[in-house]
Every structure is written in structure tokens, then in C-alpha cells.
Amino acid sequence: MLCTVAPAVGSFRAGTNTLNIVVCHNYFRERGGEDQVFEDEVGLLRAAGHHVTEFVRRNTEMSGIDVSLTAVQAPWNRSAYNELLETARSVSADVVHIHNTLPQLSPAVFKAARTSGAAVVHTLHNYRWACPKGILFRDGKPCEECLGLTVPWPAIRYGCYRGSRTGSTVVATTLAVHNLLGTPQSADAYIAAGTFIKEKMTEAGLPGERIHLKPNFLDPDPGPGAGAGGFAMYLGRLSPEKKVDTLLEAWELLEQPLPLKISGDGPLRPQVEAAAAHMPNIDYLGFAPREEVNRLLGEAGFLVFTSGTYEAQPLTILESFARGTPVIAGRLGAMATMIDDGVTGWLFEPGDAAGLAQLVSDAFEDPGTLQEMRSSVRAEFEAKYSIEHNLDRLLEIYREAMDYRDVRQRSTT
């Protein structure tokens, strides 16, 4: 656990412009977009002069004993509750901002944050309050069987969490307990990166009027690239829900051996390595460093994003937009709202390898259109996903959360 605490340097409630903020996050073993958003927002707030205390757990530091203990503590980690309550009080926190809590922090941190007197803000990185697996995806397609259920029993039946009925029982029980306690509805403000996740989580029972839209951002901005590399790019986790099989099948269907570079890692890595071994036009790069990814995205003609899940707001697409690189993605969830079909990229029916292959062929055959699109793609990034307006929006949400907290507290006195 990392808990960086320093003396309070100001308070919004005291009439200054400086906020004391505790930001909570549980890192998974494999790094993902949630970690990047957490780190970028902490850096953004600190650069603006706000006092930020990190309250963090890292699953990479867990031993076998820790894993067993965490399974028991998943519904309510008393240690995390006590430590966060003490931390928030010690820095006179104005806001406790909660990102991921699974599995070590547990939803107990919501109660600790409220008890401390701080306003509670929660970023909805995924669909965890509606789905033990967190992605509303099962058997190769979107699944909403647990959406709106107090006890998400279908997840146990299907063993949705990591393919384990035992693990699914632990997570489903955690959700059931906290649904009964009202924990999912207890934050003073929620942050959703896009309209799709806001709508789904409202369907799941979260208070839609307190779910505020704020897109993700990139820092630093890598700037536009030339897009002259003559290849397509896939960047992301190599796993079933990302529909890597659709990507590889589409490349098998291409009449011409068009170049594809793949960066990422995951359980389907052997499948990708096998495809690269018998198709010379596929170059598997392993898990490339961020600097190399930025360079490649700037050179790529377009990014292929085949995910079969709803997603929230994929940072991969933002990274592509920042470089001015168009995106071909499935017409599903957040992707359908992020990509303007024919302007910043193209959309295909999820899982349709033939449809994807046709779009890829058309794009390669018309490099002039690809180049013309790059200015529109970059303009989309600058208008929605750059850092300039993100701080103001985040602070606005914090203040709305504090206002709601004040009304809530007055109503109970």
C-alpha cells in the first residue's frame, strides 16, 4: 500500500482555491487504461497546485496468502476502511476521489470517505456495479443479464469472473451486500467518460442526475503524426473480449497481404504469434513501450480497434486521435459515439471479419482519403480530449460534489 501524506496546504471550504484531495486506486496485476487515467489526473491536479494524497493498493505486491485473505475481505476490508478514514481526516480532505476498489480496497472505502466528512467522487471506469466481470460481456458477445439485479446470480452460474465460480461468488456477493447497503448510490458525484456508460449505469440503478460527463485526456500530447508508414496498427490486450480472432480472420480474408503491426499481450498471444509466423505481413511487436507506441501510431495509416465489449472510453482511440490517425472500430458502445463514421474513421458490425476486411482494403486503396481525414481526426482530439479543458471540468465536478455533500449533511442534522 502506498499512502503519501503531507500537511494540508489549503482548503476550498476555507475560501482559497486550493483543494485537499485524497485519490484512491487499486492497481490490477496487468496495467490498463484505468491506471493511466488515475496517474494523469493526479499529475494534472498537482501541477495546478492542489494537495493530492494517494491511497493505493497494488495487486502485484500480493502473496499467495494475501490473495486468500483478500477474497475474504473483498466485501469489507476493515483495514482499508480505517486507514482511509484516518488519512482523509489527517489532511482535512475536501474530496475523496475513488477509482478502482477491487479487490483490496473493497467498497468499504466509500463508507470511510463519507464518514470523514469529505465529498465523495467516483469514476466509472467500467460496469462493475452492474456486472461482476466489469465489462458486460460473456460467450463472445455483450451480456446484460446482471444489469439491475440486486444479487447478480447469473455471474455465479456462468463463472464470469476470471472463469471461476468461486471467484464469481466472491465478487457477486460483494456486489449483493453493497447493493443492499446502498453503497453504489452513496457517492456525491460520479464521473463517466461518455454518454454510453452513463446511460448503462443509470439503468443499473446509479443516480443519473449525479453522473457527470468528463472525457479522458492525454498528457503529454504527442502531437499529430505524418501517417506515412503504410501499415495498419492494432494496440491492446490480446484477449477474447477484444475480438483478436476477428482481427486475424479479417487479415486472412484480405486479397492483398496488407501490413499490420500488433502491440500488446494477453492470453491470446500464442494465437497472434502463430498468425505472424505464417503471414509475413503481420508483425507482432510484443508489449511495446508507450514512446514506441506513440511513434507507430503517428506512422500508421489507421488503427484497428476490434473490441467486442461496450468499453467506457478507450485510451487507445484517444492516443490514435492525438496522432491524427483514423480508427476502424466495431459499431458498439463507446466506439459508436466516439467515431464519426467516414470523418474520423469507419465503423463495422462487431465480429464481422468480412466487413472489417472490406473496410481495411478500401482504406489502403485510397491513401489520399486517409491523409485528408487526419486533420479532422486531430481536430476531434483537440476539441474533446486535450488537457486544456479537463482540469476545469474535473474541478467543476468536485465543487458540485461538495455542494451536494453540504446539502446531504444539512438534511441529516
Image (cartoon, helix red, strand yellow):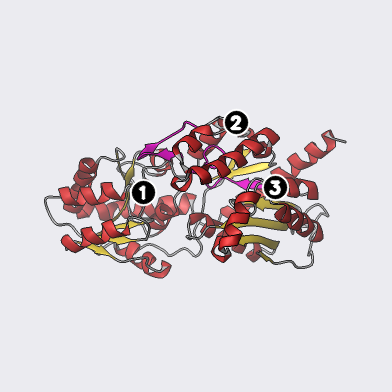
Mark 1 or mark 2, which has the lower sequence index? 2
Furthest-right residue in this view: 413
Residue 327's spot in the image, x, y percent? Answer: 33, 50
Which is nearer the eye, 110 or 333?
Answer: 110
Give the residue number, with chain letter if any, for mark 1: 242
Circle nearer the viewer, 1 or 3:
3
Which is nearer the eye, 269 or 353?
Answer: 269
Circle nearer the viewer, 1 or 2:
2
Residue 228's spot in the image, x, y percent? Answer: 25, 63
**Magenta-colored span:** 120-146
Q: Quadrant of the C terminus?
A: top right
User: Residue 108: which disc?
Assistant: 3
For the residues labelled 1 and 2, the Cα–Cα distance comes to: 28 Å
Which is nearer the eye, 38 or 2?
Answer: 2
Q: Is residue 126 magenta?
A: yes
User: How many numbered dots are placed on residues in this image?
Assistant: 3
For the residues labelled 1 and 3, the Cα–Cα distance comes to: 31 Å
Residue 124 visible within the image: yes
Question: Are there few (<14), some (14-19), or many (20+) residues within 10 Å of tag 3?
Answer: many
